[in-house]
Amino acid sequence: MVKLLVESGHRSRRPGLVQALMFQSEKEYRDNIAELHHQCDEIVAARRANPDPEAHDLLNNMILDKDPKTGEHLSDDNIRYQMVTFLIAGHETTSGMLSFATYYMLKYPS
């Protein structure tokens, strides 16, 4: 994930022509995306193979819950994309929160 995020940042600053010529970078980028998707797919498959209706977590909600109007469940592709979104967005907010929490605990020990 880290390599994927770093490369995404680099891509946003490269001219299109330069990016088009970076074949190895493109391959690594696509491979990293595929690996991230593969890991998510394995997690969903494992949960589907061994469901835990008592687990009160987000993955369980995405697998078991239905749309109240249509009765449809989320597809595995949709669940994968949601997992990637939570992973990427969550790692930033969590690290930021931990930094500020540590700072304030050190500054105000009481």
Image (cartoon, grey):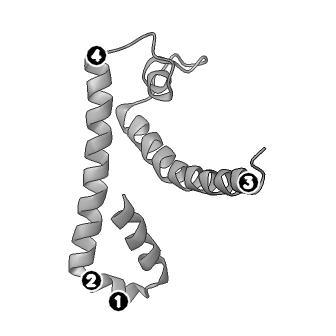
Of the 4 image quadrants, the one containing the C terminus is top right
Task: State the image coordinates of residue 42 (x, y, percent, origin top left).
Answer: 25, 35
- Relative height, residue 23 to residue 55 (above, below): below
Task: State the image coordinates of residue 69 (x, y, percent, origin top left).
Answer: 61, 18
The mark that comes first in sequence, 3 or 1, is 1
Secondary element type, mark 4: loop
Q: Amino acid at mark 3?
A: Tyr
The mark that comes first in sequence, 4 or 3, is 4
**In the image: residue 28, left or right of residue 78:** left
Q: Nearer the viewer, residue 12 or 98?
A: 98
Q: Amino acid at mark 4?
A: Asn
Q: Are marks 4 and 1 in contact (CB under 8 Å)?
A: no
The answer to which image quadrant residue 43 occupies is top left
Q: Nearer the viewer, residue 100 or 17?
A: 100
Secondary element type, mark 2: loop
Q: Are marks 1 and 2 in contact (CB under 8 Å)?
A: yes
The mark that comes first in sequence, 4 or 1, is 1
Estimate the spatial distance between the alpha carbons at disc 3 and disc 1, rounded to whole Å: 44 Å
Task: Indicate which disc residue 22 carries.
Answer: 2
- Relative height, residue 36 to residue 20 (above, below): above
- Relative height, residue 68 to residue 1 (above, below): above
Q: Which residue is label 1 attached to?
A: 18
Badge 4: residue crowd in 10 Å (few <14, some 14–19, many ≥20): few
Q: Residue at x 45, y 22 (%)?
A: 60
Estimate the spatial distance between the alpha carbons at disc 1 and disc 2, rounded to whole Å: 7 Å
Q: Amino acid at mark 2?
A: Met
Q: Which residue is label 3 attached to?
A: 104
Estimate the spatial distance between the alpha carbons at disc 4 and disc 2, rounded to whole Å: 42 Å
Task: Indicate which disc residue 50 carries.
Answer: 4
The mark that comes first in sequence, 4 or 2, is 2
